[in-house]
Image (tube, rainbow, N blue to C red):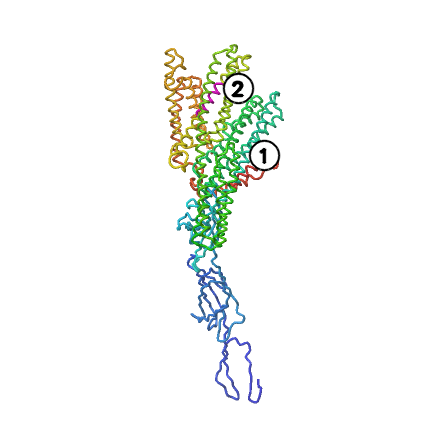
Amino acid sequence: MKEGPAKFRHRFRNVQEAIDFTLSAEGFTSPSYTLEVVPSPALVDVSLTVEPPAYLGLPSETVRNAGDATVPAGSRVTWSIATRSAERLDLIFEDTTFALAPSGSDRFVAVRRFLQGRTYRMVPRHGERVPVDPLNYRIEVVPDLHPTIEIDEQVDSAALKRRYFQGLVGDDHGFTRLQFHYRFIAGGDSVAPEQQEGVRDLSIDRKNTRQEFFHEWDVYDLTINPGDRIEYWFEVWDNDGVNGAKRTRSATGVFEAPTLDDLAKARSEQSEAIASDLKQGIKEAQDLQRELDKLRRDLLDKKDLDWQDQRKMQDVLDRQKKLQEKIERTSEDLRNSQQQQQEYRQIDERLQEKQQQVQELFENVLSEEMKELYRKVQEMLDKLDKEKLQEQMEDMKMSQEDIEKELDRTLELFKQMEVEQKAEDIADKLEKLGEEQEKLSEDTKENKESQENLEQRQDSLNKAFEEVRKEMDELEKKNEELEKPLDLPDTEQKEQEIQDQQQQSSEQLDKKQNQKASENQKKAAEEMKQMGFQMKSSMQSGQQEQQEEDMDALRQLLENIVQLSFDQEEVMDGLVEVTTKDPRFGELGRTQKELRDDAKVIEDSLFALSKRVPQLQSIVNREMNAVNGHMDEALSHIGEARGNERHKGMAADDQQRAMTALNNLALLLDEALQQMQQQSASQKPGSGSCNKPGGSGSGQGKKPSMAKMKAQQEGLQKQLDAMKKAMEEGKKKGEKPGQQNPGGNTPGMSQQLAQLAAQQAAIRKEMQRMAQDMNKDGSGAGNGLNKLAEQMEKQEKDIVNKNITPETIKRQQDIMVRLLEAEKADRERELDQKRTSNEGRDKPAEDPARFFEYQQRKAREAELLRTVPAGLKPYYRDRVNDYFGTFDRP
């Protein structure tokens, strides 16, 4: 196109490639020219190779045809970029740009390590030419997260200083270690410096990203004093190989030992509750006695039971069941209270022994015989058997009397024990306050602290002693509530002197007269220590005097019981020899009435003594009740014998049973007396502060072992053989067996036989108690001992009836064989398992995993059963809910 005389223009349209051209005009041709085309740079292909950090153990991964990727933190990313017509490539991030040169024909390579996510662009260039609107890409980084930890903690109800932990740890990649930490944050003075804090490495699977663990922490390994506080926690580390292992700490727990004041307050509250429960139990037992007596009288006038009688009797049984449960709960409350006290403070051994004896009394209020009686009553009630039910009701009424007596006795012993415990607490507090006051006296004298601090410390001690005075008033009040108060020292004057000296010290400190204040502080400290010592020594001497007095009373009772047994035997023998028409028959009846009156006096004295002497077993009062019951029956039969000769034989049978019960009672009292004598002997040697019961002897409240019972039975066998031989010799000479005296040390054969029968009865009862203990877990391990006890009971009857036959001797030999077998089994049990102690620390620690498995199984079972059928009557619904409550309690 011509634009002027010598100017032309040409447009090349849609140029896609280079064009060669020439210009020609007027016969002239120009050289050849080339129109070069500049290409547009472009991305052809992109692949990302991701290499995770080595600690993850993951393989490399290649992502093709994409610029986006998600990678673990610390990964190394390699780009391999194929382009077209690109002279270079810019890799542009928010904070920097990498200009890449080609590493080959149209190929670029870049490498970068990512710790966090980045957005970027890939821009190819050819000269100044770049693509229009290049795309943005994103490398997402998955961080290595902190590990997680969850802890569930349970306290061993049998050992309060033992903690079980169930933990769950989680992490995205794995772990390097797991630790348990603790450190004292208050107290710990009795712990070695290296034990003030501690770390325990726990085993952990490093590769498992979510796992459960268990740990048991036994604080008994540390010496814990009241008021000590320990914080504890778990720490878990992950396996982060990029930033370093990260740590997560669990929530911090605090083990807080109660202070002496806390313990005293808790014991006071628990004691009040236990005493209240005992009083309610006594009242309920009395109400049940009255209800039973009324029901029994009503049934006498009826031929058969009607539904109202059945309902009333069922109500009595239900109330009895609730009373039984209440007694068991109270016993458990006492055990827990004593355990808490023993966990955190040193208890005087004598007092600790007494606590154990009172605890055993609680547990024996309801004997197995009583429980069996209630089962029989329920059975007779279900069968509507009026005659047998009436017989059982009479026994049940006597059983209620036993329960009332035992509860009354236990309450008195419990109150006495609480007074002794409180007196010991006050004495300990006085000693501690005296030491603190003495330390303040030294600091005041040497001006070690500011005047303000010295005044504050003295004010604090003044308040503490004022609290002690209040506790002294409470002690005196509790002591006055005892049927026979303890001999406590009169400390009123000394208390006032201490308080005056403390008040003067405060006033002198306020006037900055520190030397005078220090002197009064020292006097107050000495008076406090003297007062504490006076209380302890007075209590100890008073206890020893009371023990001597109780032993004298016990000896007198023992003599009276033995004499009553002989008198009863004499009346029994006389009754057999006379007819009901003989004038002597009436005289024997009057003598029997006198013996019953004597038994009543013994009963009252024995019951009063049992309220002060815990060594007397629960069965003592029951045996005394049996004596009275049989004597009452004997009197009743004697009164009816003139009209019916058969009653004379029945009276003799009851007299025989009364005599057997008296012999049993004599043996039990003799055992208790021996225990008290051993305790008294162990207290007398050395200084007056020695007060350890039992010494190296058998100790109080300890049940005989199988070996000891075997030895006792063996001794009885020898006596029995000698007795049989003597009886045979007496027959040969034409003499009555009762006139023989083979041993030369007893007044007659009858007395020896009575003693043998009493010994056999005592061994049998211990055997039954051991069987009862062995069967508590439901295993039936004691059933064999019960069968052995039945054989022993047959021996008793033969001995009492003076019927020592070859069969008696053979049965005795069989008993010895079975005792040998039982002794061997007992030794094997002792080797296989440790005895359970009142103190939880003696119980072996349980495997934490099994502990939590048991707890969880209990929870599942409770949840499974928790749906109570809607149609249940309120009584049964309440019983089911009570059962569920046992699962909810820790």
**Residue 707, quarter of the rendered image:** top left
Give the Cα separation between the discs numbered 1 and 2: 40 Å
Residue 452 x/y as whole percent:
49, 54
Under circle 1, the secondary element is: helix
Mark carried by residue 570: none
Examine the rendering and report whether any part of residue 171 can be seen.
no
**Residue 726 versus residue 218 in the image, above or below:** above
Residue labelled with disc 1: 876
Viewer-proximal residue among 187 and 303? 187
Under circle 2, the secondary element is: helix
Q: Which residues are magenta?
A: 655-667
N-terminal of the pair, mark 1 or mark 2, is: 2
The 10 Å Cα crowd at callout 1, few under 14, some 14 to 19, many 20 or more, is few
What amino acid is at disc 1?
Tyr
Q: Is residue 113 magenta?
A: no
Residue labelled with disc 2: 633
**Residue 282 versus residue 523 in the image, above or below:** above
The 10 Å Cα crowd at callout 2, few under 14, some 14 to 19, many 20 or more, is some
Residue 142 x/y as whole percent:
49, 59
